[in-house]
Amino acid sequence: MKKLLIIPSLAIALLSGCGGEEVSMATAEEQRAIARDNSMLVAKKFISENPTYNAFKVIPNGDSTISRKCPQGDGWASLKLINEKNHIVKIKCSTYSIGIGCLESSEFAKKSYAQQDGSCNKEIAYPLPKIAG
């Protein structure tokens, strides 16, 4: 009977995110802003290296995993590229590394990075480093 009680407890612990102490709401908001700014810089570099997207504007959606319990997030922001004909291309961009860059969402889904999406990533530095632009 004790074994049956341990299994649900472990499941709850694993599903509760990164664990540890919560940061303040202001800190979580600051981290969201850094992640958004970083992903925009990474997206602009992606566009500059891919002439197909030169006429596209960037619409950031951010890293929805950032929270008070996980201020570093999963390391990925969702963004949309849109042109004057309203053609939309969805991309995923790193929130902490210009070297990792961006991938079209369809390509991102095929990479090992996709396993990080939506889960608190303890391997990412907290606080998030600001990428120099």
Image: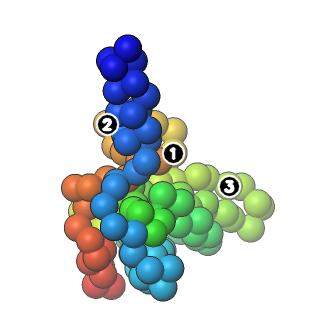
- Amino acid type indicated by mark 3: Ile
Q: Which residue is mark 2?
A: 112
Classify the position of the N terminus by image quarter. Answer: top left
Residue 115 image label: none
Point out the tag, 3 or 1, that comes first from the N-terminus.
Answer: 3
| Image spot of residue 118 (x, y percent) | 47, 47
| Secondary element type, mark 3 | strand
Q: Which residue is mark 1?
A: 105
Residue drawn at x 51%, y 54% is 91
- Amino acid type indicated by mark 1: Ser
The residue closer to the viewer here, 101 or 61, is: 61
Q: From where the camera sits, is residue 39 visible? A: no
Contact between labelled residues 1 and 3, with CB atoms less than 8 Å apart:
no
Q: Residue 24 lies in what quarter of the image? A: bottom left
Tell me the distance, in whole angstroms, between the alpha carbons under discs 1 and 2.
13 Å
Q: Is residue 53 left or right of residue 41?
A: right
Q: Residue 80 lies in what quarter of the image? A: bottom right
Tell me the distance, in whole angstroms, between the alpha carbons under discs 2 and 3.
24 Å
The residue closer to the viewer here, 95 or 108, is: 95
Vertical relation: 95 (above or below) 114: below
Point out the tag, 1 or 2, that comes first from the N-terminus.
Answer: 1
| Image spot of residue 47 (x, y percent) | 46, 66
| Secondary element type, mark 1 | helix
Residue drawn at x 25%, y 61% is 124
Residue 88 image label: 3
Q: Residue 49 lies in what quarter of the image? A: bottom left
Q: From where the camera sits, is residue 5 visible? A: yes
- Amino acid type indicated by mark 2: Ser
| Secondary element type, mark 2 | helix
Label 1 crowd bin: few (<14), some (14–19), many (20+), radius 10 Å: some
Tell me the distance, in whole angstroms, between the alpha carbons under discs 3 and 1.
11 Å
Q: Mark 2 or 3, which is nearer the eye? A: 2
